[in-house]
Image: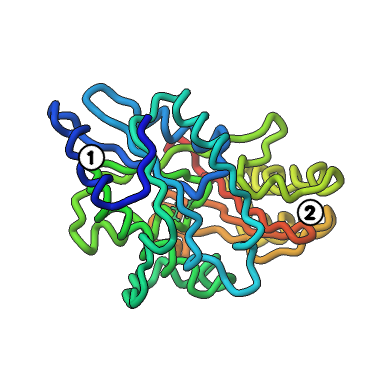
């Protein structure tokens, strides 16, 4: 696997990968890779496809009081994992390549960015949309893979790609979980032992609520029960909501509905989501 840090070298590296007629799949990440990221790489490895991963801890998607400075950076381990997984090229731009002096552009996706994490983390999705647009313009992939754990991010990127005629297929890959159900996340390493034990309450609360709503219970009551159980487990809740899978607005029982949640244990903010009507 080639590791590239300069834009001109990226362009020639991508041209080489395309030379045999292969298409390019992009797996954008912020590093600190785990099995969830590896599932994206595995999904991307298809016949006739060359896989490019990117690692860039994007300052524009972190709020002033968020964890940018302590966000885990594990370049050596990440590079080894991607090499072993059969990734073809790693794009590892320094911050001055991504945001040179004078950078002044912001990509903002209306509607789908506004509620949930968009309300809890103002500016977060502008940062995501801006950096993903840059990554798309740099790598020019045919297809890109994102985890379904970041459910709102996936909806924002799909909206942006459709609205701006980017012509890139966006594939969502199911959330990878620990044996007890906790969704894999680079931020799980912030949890101490006691918090890690409590964290399982999040997927459990969503599971209980999803089953109740699916069998016809009042969604408002199921949401209150879920919030109560998270509170009892020691979480501070940002939101627990039932939303339309595509718009993230009010749910319609005739369309796909998802439970989405964000809650904090100590300093660690966890997010998760679950389909209410799986397989329908
Ligand atoms: O999901 C992530 O890791 C990041 O938000 C992304 C998509 C790589 C943009 O920085």
Work out which quarter of the rendered image holds the N terminus and state it. Answer: top left
Count all numbered tags in the image, as a single digit.
2
Q: Tell me: 113 left or right of 212.
A: left
From this view, report whether residue 256 is shown above or below residue 160: above
Earlier in the chain: of badge 2 and badge 1, it is 1
Q: Tell me: 211 left or right of 104.
A: right
Q: Report if residue 108 is visible in the image.
A: no
For the residue pair 55 and 280, the one nearer the viewer reads as 55
Q: Which mark is residue 28?
A: none
Residue to which mark 1 is pinned:
14
Q: Which mark is residue 229?
A: 2
For the residue pair 228 and 54, the one nearer the viewer reads as 54
Tell me which residue sits at (67%, 36%) in the image. 181
Residue 24 place in picture, x, y as percent: 24, 37
Instruction: Report the Cα–Cα distance between label 2 and label 1.
Output: 49 Å
Q: Tell me: 163 left or right of 70.
A: left
Label 1 crowd (10 A; few <14 / some 14-19 / many >=20): many
Q: Is mark 2 within 8 Å of ligand 1?
A: no
Q: Nearer the viewer, mark 2 or mark 1?
A: 1
Tell me which residue sits at (57%, 43%) in the image. 32
Question: What secondary structure is marked by label 1?
Answer: helix
Q: How is the image coloured?
A: rainbow
Question: What secondary structure is marked by label 2?
Answer: helix
Residue 170 place in picture, x, y as percent: 31, 46
Displayed quadrant of residue 182: top right
Work out which quarter of the rendered image holds the C terminus and state it. Answer: top left
Displayed quadrant of residue 240: bottom right
């Amino acid at each position: 696997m080639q590791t590239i840090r300069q834009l001109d070298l990226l362009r020639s590296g991508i041209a080489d990968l395309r030379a045999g007629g292969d298409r390019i799949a992009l797996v954008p990440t912020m590093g600190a890779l785990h099995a969830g990221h590896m599932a994206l790489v595995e999904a991307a490895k298809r016949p006739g496809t060359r896989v490019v991963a990117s690692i860039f801890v994007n300052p524009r998607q972190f709020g002033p009081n968020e964890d940018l400075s302590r966000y885990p950076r594990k370049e050596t381990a990440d590079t080894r994992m991607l090499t072993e997984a059969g990734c073809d090229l790693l794009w590892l731009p320094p911050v001055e390549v991504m945001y040179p002096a004078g950078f002044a552009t912001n990509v903002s996706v209306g509607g789908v960015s506004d509620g949930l994490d968009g309300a809890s983390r103002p500016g977060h999705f502008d940062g995501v949309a801006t950096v993903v647009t840059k990554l798309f313009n740099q790598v020019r992939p045919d297809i890109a893979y994102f985890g379904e754990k970041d459910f709102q991010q996936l909806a924002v990127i799909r909206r942006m790609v459709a609205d701006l005629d980017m012509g890139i297929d966006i594939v969502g890959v199911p959330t990878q979980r620990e044996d007890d159900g906790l969704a894999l996340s680079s931020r799980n390493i912030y949890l101490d032992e006691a918090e890690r034990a409590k964290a399982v309450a999040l997927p459990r609360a969503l599971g209980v609520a999803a089953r109740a709503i699916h069998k016809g219970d009042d969604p408002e009551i199921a949401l209150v029960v879920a919030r109560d159980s998270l509170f009892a487990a020691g979480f501070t809740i940002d939101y627990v909501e039932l939303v339309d899978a595509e718009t993230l607005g009010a749910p319609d029982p005739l369309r796909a509905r998802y439970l989405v949640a964000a809650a904090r244990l100590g300093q660690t903010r966890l997010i998760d989501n679950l389909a209410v009507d799986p397989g329908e």
